[in-house]
Amino acid sequence: MREILRAAFVIARRDFTAIIFSKSFILFLIGPLLPVVFGVAFGTIGDRMANDSMRPVVAVALSAAESKALDAAHRRLDARGVPDLRRYPASSYPQALLAGKGQGVIAVLSGTLARPVLTGRRGDVDQMRGDLSLLISVARAGTTLPDTRIATRIVAESTGSDRQSRLLTGRAAQVILFMLTMLLAGMVLSNMVEEKTNKIIEVLAAAVPVDAIFLGKLLAMLAMSFVGIAVWATTALVGYLLLFGSTVHSPEPAVGWPMFVMLGVLYFTMAYTLLGSLFIGIGAQASTVREVQTISMPITMGQVLIFFFASFSVDRMGQTPEVIAAIFPFSSPFAMIARAAQSDALLPHVLALCWQALWVAVIIRIGVRLFRRNVLKSGTGEKRRGIFSRALVSIGLSRT
């Protein structure tokens, strides 16, 4: 075991260095940031358009006194969902206002406050009738409508509010964990194909145990993933502080933020290594990139179904679905990170992490056996060790 771990760290250092110092790694870091930047930019533009140019405008063709009362009611309600009001002379013809170019109104309120008439297309009229009815009622009541002042009492704790906020924290952590795992673990599939094509895998298999090859490559990709996550998280935090000028205030999970973050890192490691060990075992059987792409689709769909099942069990802690999701190895990290947001018990997390690590070892062992039988097929490695000894010394995997 000691020799396997030593060889695994050598391979991990070799692969990690090759990935980090490659030009494609810069594109890998920038790639996920571009959709976020464009999403924020277009979201801001779209929100501004929705609040300004796309906000419906209703023409008010009432008398001066009634238009003034309606404006006062609009200010009093201060309802953002209520359409904007634009005053016109009471003698204005509604159809002319709707047909006029440059007016920008989608409906016309005419008549009197006692007998209002709303003119417009059926869909627009049905959509705005309720809001305008409330406005008119407040305008007609005027000062006779009492302005009720509500006394408030602030408390430090609320069980119902805490439960809802922790549910939201658990679901958000699940989504982040799933997105990062699916984004990063898929690259392990094609990792073995390249080295099988240029015969490097034969050199490695002759030098070290195959278990060390699988484990080393998995550790290298995991380390590369943490580098990417650190860059993305730092960029997101700096961008948020520059835009909003304050730190994020999120509902506190049951175990507290320091422990929750540490468990998040551990469960991401487990989710990544579980899926990555499955990917590297399956990818090792493929001989071309096309086969890898064909294999990846059903695995991805299966993982999406597993995530939906884990998400379904978030608000059913202690019930059968949540227990099954916590036991099943591939859904266990997602179920347990949600449990950490809702329960402060730490012993279940220790058991879950040990259980998941056991399954990582089992999956790697199965993948190694299949690789030896289907790819290497025969040979003990001793014969190869003599053939490739010079190559081993040159890449630093064997002692002279």
Image (spheres, grey):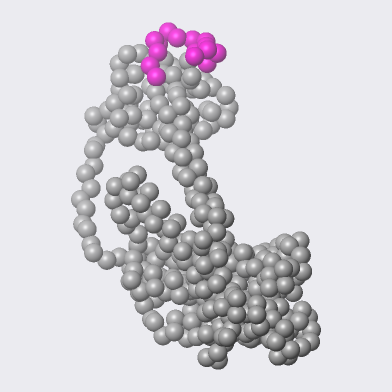
Magenta segment: does it hold 91? Answer: yes
From the image, which quarter does the C terminus lie in? bottom right
Q: Which of the pair 379/107 is nearer the observer?
A: 379
- Magenta span of residues: 86-102
In the image, is residue 151 above or below residue 73? below
> Is any atom of residue 99 visible in this view?
yes
Identify which residue is drawn at 52% across, 79% down. 9
Identity of the residue furthest to the top in this view: 91
Toward which corner of the image does residue 252 lie, by quadrant?
Answer: bottom left
Given residues 399 and 63, the one toward you in this image is: 399
Question: Where's residue 247, x and y in %?
Answer: 30, 54
User: Who's the residue at 47% across and 66% down the image?
Assistant: 226
- In-image side of 81 versus 270 (left or right): left
> Which is more toward the observer, 93 or 79?
79
**Is residue 11 on the magenta stretch?**
no
Q: Quadrant of the N terminus?
A: bottom right
The picture places residue 5, in percent across and down from the top left corner, at 53, 85
Q: Is residue 148 above or below residue 283?
A: above
Is 194 placed above or below 134 here? below
**Where does the image place residue 172, in percent across and percent down from the top left?**
46, 61
Q: Is residue 130 left or right of residue 154?
A: right
